[in-house]
Amino acid sequence: MRKEFLPFTKPAINEDDIQAVTDVLRSGWITNGPQNAALEQGICDYTGNQYGVALSSATAAMHILLKAMNIGPGDEVVTPSMTWVSIVNMIVLAGATPVFAEIDQDTMLVTPETLKAAITPRTKLIVPVHFAGAALDLDGLRAVAGDIPLVEDAAHALGTYYKGRHIGSTGSAIYSFHAIKNITTGEGGMFVTDDKALADQIRLWKFHGIGMDAFDRQNRGRSPQAEVLQPGFKYNLTDICAAIGVSQLKRLNQINAKRRELAMLYREKLAEIPEIRPLADPSGYDFTHAWHLFVVRVDTPKIDRNAFMAKLKEQNIGTGLHFRCAHLQKYYRETMGFRAGMLPATEYNSDRICSLPLFPAMTAGDVGDVAEAIKTVLAHA
Ligand SMILES: *Cc1c(COP(=O)(O)O)cnc(C)c1O
Protein backbone atom coordinates (compact mmCIF):
# COMPACT_ATOMS: atom_id res chain seq x y z
CA MET A 1 0.00 0.00 0.00
CA ARG A 2 1.02 3.58 -0.69
CA LYS A 3 2.75 5.19 2.31
CA GLU A 4 1.90 8.84 1.71
CA PHE A 5 -1.63 10.13 1.14
CA LEU A 6 -2.23 11.15 -2.48
CA PRO A 7 -4.73 14.01 -2.48
CA PHE A 8 -7.34 14.33 -5.21
CA THR A 9 -5.81 17.66 -6.19
CA LYS A 10 -3.13 20.16 -5.27
CA PRO A 11 -2.68 23.65 -6.76
CA ALA A 12 0.36 23.99 -9.03
CA ILE A 13 2.05 26.86 -7.15
CA ASN A 14 5.68 27.60 -7.93
CA GLU A 15 8.28 30.16 -6.86
CA ASP A 16 7.29 32.55 -9.68
CA ASP A 17 3.72 32.64 -8.32
CA ILE A 18 5.02 33.35 -4.82
CA GLN A 19 7.32 36.07 -6.14
CA ALA A 20 4.40 37.64 -8.05
CA VAL A 21 2.40 37.87 -4.83
CA THR A 22 5.25 39.39 -2.81
CA ASP A 23 5.83 41.92 -5.59
CA VAL A 24 2.22 43.06 -5.27
CA LEU A 25 2.45 43.17 -1.48
CA ARG A 26 5.52 45.41 -1.74
CA SER A 27 4.07 47.61 -4.48
CA GLY A 28 1.76 49.78 -2.39
CA TRP A 29 -1.36 48.75 -4.36
CA ILE A 30 -2.94 45.46 -3.30
CA THR A 31 -6.58 45.53 -4.42
CA ASN A 32 -7.76 45.54 -8.03
CA GLY A 33 -5.23 47.34 -10.17
CA PRO A 34 -2.61 46.54 -12.78
CA GLN A 35 -2.60 42.77 -12.09
CA ASN A 36 -6.36 42.62 -12.67
CA ALA A 37 -5.89 44.44 -15.96
CA ALA A 38 -3.07 42.03 -16.90
CA LEU A 39 -5.19 38.97 -16.04
CA GLU A 40 -8.13 40.29 -18.05
CA GLN A 41 -5.87 40.95 -21.03
CA GLY A 42 -4.14 37.59 -20.59
CA ILE A 43 -7.41 35.63 -20.61
CA CYS A 44 -8.66 37.61 -23.62
CA ASP A 45 -5.42 36.86 -25.47
CA TYR A 46 -5.56 33.18 -24.49
CA THR A 47 -9.21 32.60 -25.36
CA GLY A 48 -9.38 35.00 -28.29
CA ASN A 49 -12.35 36.90 -26.89
CA GLN A 50 -12.57 40.70 -26.64
CA TYR A 51 -13.62 41.85 -23.17
CA GLY A 52 -12.67 40.29 -19.85
CA VAL A 53 -13.94 41.27 -16.42
CA ALA A 54 -12.06 39.78 -13.45
CA LEU A 55 -14.25 38.90 -10.48
CA SER A 56 -14.00 37.41 -7.01
CA SER A 57 -15.47 34.10 -8.26
CA ALA A 58 -17.34 32.45 -11.12
CA THR A 59 -20.37 32.42 -8.83
CA ALA A 60 -20.16 36.21 -8.60
CA ALA A 61 -20.03 36.35 -12.41
CA MET A 62 -23.22 34.27 -12.59
CA HIS A 63 -24.92 36.44 -9.97
CA ILE A 64 -24.31 39.71 -11.76
CA LEU A 65 -24.92 38.20 -15.19
CA LEU A 66 -28.48 37.42 -14.09
CA LYS A 67 -28.80 40.98 -12.74
CA ALA A 68 -27.35 42.54 -15.87
CA MET A 69 -29.77 40.50 -18.00
CA ASN A 70 -32.65 41.47 -15.74
CA ILE A 71 -33.61 37.84 -15.15
CA GLY A 72 -36.07 37.26 -12.32
CA PRO A 73 -39.48 35.86 -11.37
CA GLY A 74 -41.27 34.14 -14.25
CA ASP A 75 -38.04 33.58 -16.17
CA GLU A 76 -36.40 30.21 -16.73
CA VAL A 77 -32.68 29.49 -16.95
CA VAL A 78 -31.59 26.19 -18.48
CA THR A 79 -28.52 24.52 -17.00
CA PRO A 80 -27.60 20.91 -16.23
CA SER A 81 -28.37 19.52 -12.78
CA MET A 82 -24.89 17.98 -13.03
CA THR A 83 -23.09 21.24 -12.25
CA TRP A 84 -21.69 23.04 -9.28
CA VAL A 85 -24.67 24.09 -7.13
CA SER A 86 -23.57 27.72 -6.99
CA ILE A 87 -24.91 28.27 -10.51
CA VAL A 88 -28.31 26.86 -9.56
CA ASN A 89 -28.31 28.80 -6.29
CA MET A 90 -27.78 32.07 -8.16
CA ILE A 91 -30.70 31.33 -10.48
CA VAL A 92 -32.97 30.66 -7.51
CA LEU A 93 -31.73 33.69 -5.56
CA ALA A 94 -32.54 35.84 -8.60
CA GLY A 95 -36.13 34.63 -8.26
CA ALA A 96 -35.93 32.75 -11.57
CA THR A 97 -36.64 29.07 -12.17
CA PRO A 98 -33.85 26.59 -12.94
CA VAL A 99 -34.78 24.14 -15.69
CA PHE A 100 -32.41 21.20 -15.83
CA ALA A 101 -31.17 19.91 -19.15
CA GLU A 102 -30.35 16.20 -19.16
CA ILE A 103 -26.80 15.10 -19.99
CA ASP A 104 -25.46 12.36 -22.21
CA GLN A 105 -24.85 9.39 -19.93
CA ASP A 106 -21.35 8.63 -21.20
CA THR A 107 -19.90 12.12 -21.75
CA MET A 108 -21.88 13.94 -19.06
CA LEU A 109 -22.38 16.82 -21.50
CA VAL A 110 -25.60 18.61 -22.41
CA THR A 111 -26.39 17.83 -26.09
CA PRO A 112 -28.49 19.70 -28.66
CA GLU A 113 -31.26 17.13 -28.13
CA THR A 114 -31.33 17.44 -24.34
CA LEU A 115 -31.16 21.23 -24.57
CA LYS A 116 -34.08 21.30 -26.97
CA ALA A 117 -36.23 19.35 -24.51
CA ALA A 118 -35.56 21.94 -21.76
CA ILE A 119 -36.38 25.11 -23.71
CA THR A 120 -39.77 26.80 -23.26
CA PRO A 121 -41.16 30.23 -24.22
CA ARG A 122 -39.98 31.43 -20.77
CA THR A 123 -36.32 30.48 -21.30
CA LYS A 124 -34.18 33.62 -20.90
CA LEU A 125 -30.69 32.14 -20.62
CA ILE A 126 -28.85 28.86 -21.23
CA VAL A 127 -25.74 27.95 -19.19
CA PRO A 128 -24.28 24.60 -20.29
CA VAL A 129 -21.09 23.21 -18.73
CA HIS A 130 -17.94 22.05 -20.52
CA PHE A 131 -17.90 19.21 -18.03
CA ALA A 132 -14.49 18.01 -16.77
CA GLY A 133 -12.82 20.02 -19.56
CA ALA A 134 -14.39 18.27 -22.57
CA ALA A 135 -15.99 20.59 -25.14
CA LEU A 136 -19.72 20.91 -25.59
CA ASP A 137 -21.09 20.73 -29.13
CA LEU A 138 -21.30 24.51 -29.32
CA ASP A 139 -22.52 24.74 -32.93
CA GLY A 140 -25.28 22.26 -32.21
CA LEU A 141 -26.27 23.96 -28.95
CA ARG A 142 -26.25 27.44 -30.51
CA ALA A 143 -28.43 26.24 -33.36
CA VAL A 144 -30.99 24.97 -30.85
CA ALA A 145 -30.70 28.10 -28.67
CA GLY A 146 -31.44 30.41 -31.59
CA ASP A 147 -31.95 33.92 -30.18
CA ILE A 148 -31.84 32.82 -26.53
CA PRO A 149 -28.54 33.93 -24.95
CA LEU A 150 -26.13 31.08 -24.23
CA VAL A 151 -23.31 31.67 -21.74
CA GLU A 152 -20.75 28.88 -21.42
CA ASP A 153 -19.89 27.68 -17.92
CA ALA A 154 -16.20 27.29 -18.68
CA ALA A 155 -15.07 26.74 -15.09
CA HIS A 156 -13.47 23.44 -16.18
CA ALA A 157 -12.38 24.58 -19.59
CA LEU A 158 -9.30 26.80 -19.66
CA GLY A 159 -7.40 25.08 -22.43
CA THR A 160 -10.44 23.44 -24.03
CA TYR A 161 -10.73 23.90 -27.79
CA TYR A 162 -13.72 23.26 -30.02
CA LYS A 163 -13.10 22.85 -33.76
CA GLY A 164 -9.69 24.49 -33.38
CA ARG A 165 -10.79 27.57 -31.44
CA HIS A 166 -10.63 28.11 -27.71
CA ILE A 167 -14.05 27.80 -26.12
CA GLY A 168 -15.37 31.20 -25.05
CA SER A 169 -13.60 32.85 -28.00
CA THR A 170 -16.94 34.27 -29.17
CA GLY A 171 -20.14 34.93 -27.27
CA SER A 172 -19.84 34.90 -23.48
CA ALA A 173 -18.23 32.50 -21.02
CA ILE A 174 -17.47 32.28 -17.31
CA TYR A 175 -14.13 30.97 -16.03
CA SER A 176 -13.24 30.08 -12.45
CA PHE A 177 -9.88 30.37 -10.72
CA HIS A 178 -10.98 28.49 -7.60
CA ALA A 179 -8.18 26.56 -5.89
CA ILE A 180 -8.85 23.28 -7.73
CA LYS A 181 -9.26 24.68 -11.26
CA ASN A 182 -6.57 24.33 -13.96
CA ILE A 183 -5.13 27.69 -12.98
CA THR A 184 -5.99 29.39 -9.73
CA THR A 185 -5.99 32.74 -7.98
CA GLY A 186 -7.01 31.12 -4.68
CA GLU A 187 -10.53 32.32 -5.36
CA GLY A 188 -11.46 34.23 -8.48
CA GLY A 189 -13.28 34.21 -11.77
CA MET A 190 -13.53 35.92 -15.13
CA PHE A 191 -16.40 36.86 -17.41
CA VAL A 192 -15.40 37.09 -21.07
CA THR A 193 -17.61 38.36 -23.86
CA ASP A 194 -17.63 39.90 -27.31
CA ASP A 195 -20.56 42.12 -26.27
CA LYS A 196 -19.14 45.45 -25.10
CA ALA A 197 -22.43 46.63 -23.60
CA LEU A 198 -22.70 43.44 -21.53
CA ALA A 199 -19.06 43.72 -20.40
CA ASP A 200 -19.70 47.31 -19.28
CA GLN A 201 -22.79 46.18 -17.35
CA ILE A 202 -20.88 43.40 -15.61
CA ARG A 203 -18.10 45.83 -14.69
CA LEU A 204 -20.66 48.25 -13.27
CA TRP A 205 -22.45 45.59 -11.21
CA LYS A 206 -19.18 44.21 -9.84
CA PHE A 207 -18.13 47.40 -8.05
CA HIS A 208 -20.97 49.20 -6.25
CA GLY A 209 -22.57 50.30 -9.50
CA ILE A 210 -20.01 53.08 -9.68
CA GLY A 211 -19.01 54.10 -13.18
CA MET A 212 -15.55 52.55 -12.81
CA ASP A 213 -13.74 50.22 -10.45
CA ALA A 214 -11.15 51.17 -7.86
CA PHE A 215 -8.15 51.57 -10.09
CA ASP A 216 -7.57 53.99 -12.87
CA ARG A 217 -4.15 53.93 -14.49
CA GLN A 218 -3.92 57.70 -14.74
CA ASN A 219 -5.18 58.49 -11.27
CA ARG A 220 -3.83 55.53 -9.25
CA GLY A 221 -7.31 55.19 -7.87
CA ARG A 222 -10.68 56.18 -9.20
CA SER A 223 -11.93 59.71 -9.39
CA PRO A 224 -13.45 60.62 -6.03
CA GLN A 225 -16.29 62.21 -7.97
CA ALA A 226 -17.37 58.88 -9.54
CA GLU A 227 -20.96 58.20 -8.54
CA VAL A 228 -23.43 55.34 -8.27
CA LEU A 229 -25.29 54.76 -11.51
CA GLN A 230 -27.25 51.87 -9.97
CA PRO A 231 -26.76 49.89 -6.73
CA GLY A 232 -24.14 47.22 -7.35
CA PHE A 233 -22.19 44.50 -5.54
CA LYS A 234 -18.58 44.24 -4.41
CA TYR A 235 -17.19 41.39 -6.45
CA ASN A 236 -13.77 42.73 -7.46
CA LEU A 237 -10.64 40.59 -7.32
CA THR A 238 -7.57 41.74 -5.39
CA ASP A 239 -4.28 42.21 -7.23
CA ILE A 240 -2.73 39.83 -4.68
CA CYS A 241 -4.93 37.11 -6.20
CA ALA A 242 -4.79 38.32 -9.79
CA ALA A 243 -0.99 38.20 -9.75
CA ILE A 244 -1.07 34.45 -9.07
CA GLY A 245 -3.34 34.02 -12.10
CA VAL A 246 -1.11 36.13 -14.35
CA SER A 247 1.87 34.03 -13.32
CA GLN A 248 0.02 30.71 -13.69
CA LEU A 249 -1.42 31.62 -17.08
CA LYS A 250 2.13 31.55 -18.48
CA ARG A 251 2.29 27.85 -17.55
CA LEU A 252 -1.26 26.86 -18.49
CA ASN A 253 -0.25 24.95 -21.63
CA GLN A 254 2.44 23.11 -19.68
CA ILE A 255 0.02 22.36 -16.84
CA ASN A 256 -2.60 20.99 -19.25
CA ALA A 257 -0.03 18.92 -21.16
CA LYS A 258 0.88 17.21 -17.90
CA ARG A 259 -2.78 16.68 -17.05
CA ARG A 260 -3.34 15.11 -20.48
CA GLU A 261 -0.37 12.78 -20.05
CA LEU A 262 -1.71 11.58 -16.69
CA ALA A 263 -5.24 11.18 -18.08
CA MET A 264 -3.98 9.03 -20.96
CA LEU A 265 -2.11 6.87 -18.49
CA TYR A 266 -5.29 6.46 -16.42
CA ARG A 267 -7.20 5.39 -19.51
CA GLU A 268 -4.56 2.78 -20.25
CA LYS A 269 -4.50 1.42 -16.69
CA LEU A 270 -8.29 1.46 -16.24
CA ALA A 271 -8.85 -0.45 -19.49
CA GLU A 272 -7.96 -3.53 -17.41
CA ILE A 273 -10.64 -2.74 -14.78
CA PRO A 274 -14.11 -3.00 -16.37
CA GLU A 275 -15.95 -2.16 -13.10
CA ILE A 276 -14.49 1.36 -13.19
CA ARG A 277 -15.66 3.26 -16.26
CA PRO A 278 -14.08 6.56 -17.32
CA LEU A 279 -16.14 9.12 -19.22
CA ALA A 280 -16.28 8.79 -22.99
CA ASP A 281 -15.10 11.57 -25.30
CA PRO A 282 -17.88 13.32 -27.20
CA SER A 283 -17.87 12.27 -30.86
CA GLY A 284 -18.76 13.98 -34.11
CA TYR A 285 -16.54 17.03 -33.69
CA ASP A 286 -12.94 17.92 -33.18
CA PHE A 287 -11.99 19.15 -29.70
CA THR A 288 -9.11 19.40 -27.23
CA HIS A 289 -9.76 18.32 -23.65
CA ALA A 290 -8.45 20.51 -20.78
CA TRP A 291 -8.52 17.53 -18.41
CA HIS A 292 -9.78 19.49 -15.43
CA LEU A 293 -11.05 16.26 -13.89
CA PHE A 294 -10.60 12.55 -14.46
CA VAL A 295 -14.07 11.21 -13.66
CA VAL A 296 -14.89 7.51 -13.40
CA ARG A 297 -18.13 5.65 -12.69
CA VAL A 298 -18.11 2.87 -10.11
CA ASP A 299 -20.39 0.51 -11.98
CA THR A 300 -20.46 -2.81 -10.19
CA PRO A 301 -22.78 -4.60 -7.71
CA LYS A 302 -19.63 -5.40 -5.67
CA ILE A 303 -19.34 -1.96 -4.09
CA ASP A 304 -21.11 1.37 -4.24
CA ARG A 305 -19.42 4.70 -4.95
CA ASN A 306 -19.41 6.01 -1.38
CA ALA A 307 -17.84 2.83 -0.02
CA PHE A 308 -15.39 2.84 -2.93
CA MET A 309 -14.25 6.38 -2.03
CA ALA A 310 -13.91 5.44 1.65
CA LYS A 311 -11.94 2.28 0.85
CA LEU A 312 -9.61 4.18 -1.48
CA LYS A 313 -8.97 6.64 1.30
CA GLU A 314 -7.92 3.74 3.53
CA GLN A 315 -5.45 2.91 0.76
CA ASN A 316 -4.14 6.51 1.01
CA ILE A 317 -5.80 7.65 -2.21
CA GLY A 318 -7.96 10.78 -2.13
CA THR A 319 -10.91 11.27 -4.48
CA GLY A 320 -13.44 14.01 -5.23
CA LEU A 321 -17.13 14.05 -6.14
CA HIS A 322 -18.00 16.37 -9.03
CA PHE A 323 -20.90 16.56 -8.60
CA ARG A 324 -23.91 15.33 -6.69
CA CYS A 325 -26.71 16.40 -9.00
CA ALA A 326 -28.40 19.62 -7.89
CA HIS A 327 -32.05 18.66 -8.35
CA LEU A 328 -31.99 15.94 -5.69
CA GLN A 329 -30.32 18.02 -3.00
CA LYS A 330 -32.48 18.76 0.05
CA TYR A 331 -33.55 22.32 -0.75
CA TYR A 332 -34.37 21.62 -4.38
CA ARG A 333 -36.27 18.43 -3.61
CA GLU A 334 -38.29 19.99 -0.84
CA THR A 335 -39.07 23.40 -2.28
CA MET A 336 -39.20 22.75 -6.01
CA GLY A 337 -40.60 19.26 -6.06
CA PHE A 338 -37.79 17.61 -8.00
CA ARG A 339 -37.88 13.82 -7.78
CA ALA A 340 -35.58 10.92 -8.53
CA GLY A 341 -36.32 9.55 -11.99
CA MET A 342 -36.66 12.97 -13.67
CA LEU A 343 -33.16 12.93 -15.15
CA PRO A 344 -32.03 9.29 -15.50
CA ALA A 345 -28.60 9.87 -17.07
CA THR A 346 -27.78 12.63 -14.57
CA GLU A 347 -28.88 10.46 -11.66
CA TYR A 348 -27.02 7.41 -12.98
CA ASN A 349 -23.83 9.42 -12.89
CA SER A 350 -24.60 11.28 -9.67
CA ASP A 351 -24.78 7.91 -7.90
CA ARG A 352 -21.63 6.45 -9.46
CA ILE A 353 -19.04 9.12 -10.24
CA CYS A 354 -15.88 10.02 -8.45
CA SER A 355 -12.88 12.07 -9.52
CA LEU A 356 -9.49 10.37 -9.31
CA PRO A 357 -6.36 12.30 -8.29
CA LEU A 358 -5.21 14.56 -11.12
CA PHE A 359 -2.77 17.44 -10.71
CA PRO A 360 0.44 18.45 -12.49
CA ALA A 361 2.88 17.41 -9.74
CA MET A 362 1.68 13.78 -9.97
CA THR A 363 3.94 11.14 -11.46
CA ALA A 364 3.26 8.07 -13.59
CA GLY A 365 4.01 6.10 -10.42
CA ASP A 366 1.16 7.88 -8.63
CA VAL A 367 -1.27 6.86 -11.39
CA GLY A 368 0.02 3.30 -11.03
CA ASP A 369 -0.61 3.50 -7.27
CA VAL A 370 -4.19 4.61 -7.87
CA ALA A 371 -4.80 1.72 -10.27
CA GLU A 372 -3.29 -0.77 -7.83
CA ALA A 373 -5.37 0.62 -4.95
CA ILE A 374 -8.53 0.32 -7.07
CA LYS A 375 -7.71 -3.33 -7.82
CA THR A 376 -7.15 -4.01 -4.12
CA VAL A 377 -10.44 -2.35 -3.14
CA LEU A 378 -12.38 -4.32 -5.77
CA ALA A 379 -10.67 -7.60 -4.80
CA HIS A 380 -11.81 -7.16 -1.19
CA ALA A 381 -15.29 -5.84 -1.99
C1 LIG B 1 -16.01 25.71 -9.78
C2 LIG B 1 -17.25 25.79 -10.57
C3 LIG B 1 -18.07 26.92 -10.55
C4 LIG B 1 -17.91 28.03 -9.57
O1 LIG B 1 -16.69 28.62 -9.52
P1 LIG B 1 -16.32 29.58 -8.29
O2 LIG B 1 -15.18 30.39 -8.83
O3 LIG B 1 -15.93 28.69 -7.16
O4 LIG B 1 -17.49 30.41 -7.97
C5 LIG B 1 -19.15 26.97 -11.43
N1 LIG B 1 -19.43 25.95 -12.25
C6 LIG B 1 -18.68 24.83 -12.27
C7 LIG B 1 -19.04 23.75 -13.23
C8 LIG B 1 -17.58 24.70 -11.42
O5 LIG B 1 -16.86 23.57 -11.41
Image (cartoon, rainbow, N blue to C red):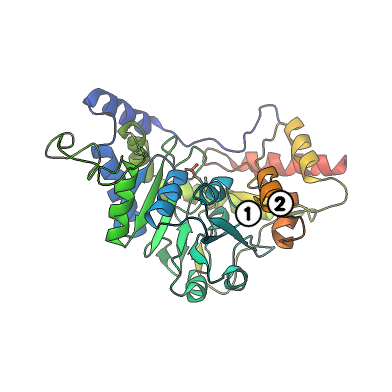
The residue carrying mark 1 is: 82
> In this view of the protein, which residue sits in the foreground, 19 or 81?
81
Q: Please, is residue 136 above or below residue 40 in the view?
A: below
Residue 301 horizontal/vertical position (percent): 87, 51
Q: In the displayed image of the protein, which residue is found farthest to the left?
A: 218
- Residue plotted at (51% across, 48% down): 90
Locate residue 154, reporting x and y percent: 47, 54
The C terminus lies in quadrant: top right
Do the residues under discs 2 and 1 have CB atoms within 8 angstroms?
yes
Mark nearer the N terminus (2 vs 1): 1
Amino acid tagged 1: Met
Q: Residues within 10 Å of mark 1 (few under 14, many from 20)?
A: many
| Closer to the camera in the image, 116 or 30 | 116
Whether residue 73 sits left or right of residue 330 in the image: it is left
**Which secondary structure, mark 1?**
loop
Q: CA distance from mark 2 to mark 1?
A: 8 Å
Percent position (x, y) of residue 164? 42, 68
Quadrant in which the N terminus is drawn: top right
Where does residue 69 sit, x and y in percent of width and height? 39, 58
Mark yes or no: residue 271 visible: no
The reply to whether residue 31 is in sight is yes
Q: Secondary structure at mark 2?
A: helix
Q: Is residue 381 left or right of residue 184?
A: right
Neighbours of disc 2 within 10 Å: few (<14), some (14-19), many (20+): many
Report whether the residue tagged 2 is closer than 8 Å to ligand 1.
no
Residue positioned 77% across, 45% down in the render: 305
Residue drawn at point x = 62 percent, y = 71 percent: 117
Which kind of residue does numbered mark 2 sit on?
Answer: Ser
Which of the two residues, 67 or 274, is positioned nearer the viewer here?
Answer: 67
- Above or below residue 114? Residue 89 is above
Say which mark, if any, is on residue 350.
2
Using the image, determine if residue 316 lies above or below residue 328. Answer: above
